[in-house]
Image (cartoon, rainbow, N blue to C red):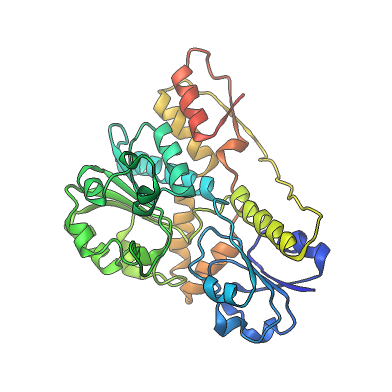
Amino acid sequence: MLILVDENIPMGREAFAAHGEVRLFAGRGLTRAQLSDAQALIVRSVTRVDAKLLEGTQVRFVGTATIGTDHVDMPWLAERGIGFSSAPGCNANSVGEYVASALTGLESRQGFPLAGKTLGIIGWGHVGKRVEAKAAALGLRILRNDPPLQAAAHDARSFSPLERLTVECDILSLHVPLITDGSHPTLRLCDAGFFSRLAKPIVLLNTCRGEVIDETALRTARRSGKIRHLVLDVFAGEPRPDPATCAAADLITPHIAGYSLPGKLNGTTQVAAAFRRHFGYADAWKPEYPAPAEADIAYVEESDTAFERRCIAAVYDVAADDARLRAALTESDPGKGFDRLRREYPIRHEFGSFQVIRLPEEKRVLRSRLSGLGFRDG
């Protein structure tokens, strides 16, 4: 069996090697000719999988090591009897930590205090729930918006209409799939009308899909003061984001919010398991997770908030990714730079790989907040 695996999927060769020849490919450049002898295709979000790519090939299984599936024509696969799996929730915790790092970074560098603020989560799936957990640990008040989930919920009171979020929230964070039609489309959800309804300047974060925002309307809202701070991990023009949009943002990153090591390896593991189920293989595969070089964070006597922020920055500071992307966008081919940053992304551990040591017994509230963020108590 020939198995084609995107070269950016961590340990992709190791996960599938027991079941045939594994051939790595560049995600944006895949052609039908490369699939001529392949029976399985493992992709990420940069590869469009549809009839144009697969018609007439021998591919019997497609896996995407991502939460999103808008790049895959799933009805067409189902019609042809081609197996399919995504990796729902695989990097949800990683995105939650990204949001925590971005917000606390804005607090320390831009003077945006989090105390007393309300966060609106638009899209309350796997990622939205993790973002809520981190935000609650930071002391934020939470409002949720998710019309499809609200329609299916036994207690619709746990959700709020978008109009309430645009009035009450100081921060809005987007975590919706890209949906182009139907009852609840999200394509250009944040358009000129959306921004006009904002009752006060907000912090806006987008870590789902760039096309969820109308970037022209976004830049207008930023200039007019409707957007106080802007954090973008995704762009409509990937891998060549609009320079004006990038210049308008406080933090920009190359679609790596979910790129923690556990987040990426969870995706590999989930898709590899689905592949084995589809083809009837009984064996299993588990990756090895390298530990941080220094997994202890020692308590420093300062305010609880300052120490909490210190712990977050010690594990992941989103500003480093912002600096790398801004440098890459000055290169002769920004698109290649964008993709290179994703391909060569350094190992990023999660909060749960670290333990806080020498924390005084009386610091019960701080201990609870750090635990809520995911840190271990040493």
Query: In the displayed structure, does residue 19 sit left or right of residue 171?
Result: right
Q: Position of residue 304 (x, y in %)?
A: 42, 24
Task: Please name the residue shown 78% across and 53% down the image.
Answer: 284
Q: Position of residue 129 (x, y in %)?
A: 45, 43
Q: Position of residue 112 (x, y in %)?
A: 29, 40
> Which image quadrant is residue 155 in?
top left
Task: Please name the residue shown 54% across and 70% down the image.
Answer: 74
Quadrant in which the C terminus appears: top right
Front residue of 370/51: it is 51
Res. 317 visible in picture: no
> Which image quadrant is residue 322 in?
bottom left
Q: Is residue 34 above or below residue 253?
A: below
Q: Is residue 155 above or below residue 245?
A: above
Q: Position of residue 355 (x, y in %)?
A: 60, 29
> Which image quadrant is residue 159 in?
top left
Res. 59 visible in picture: yes
Task: Please name the residue shown 30% across and 61% down the image.
Answer: 248
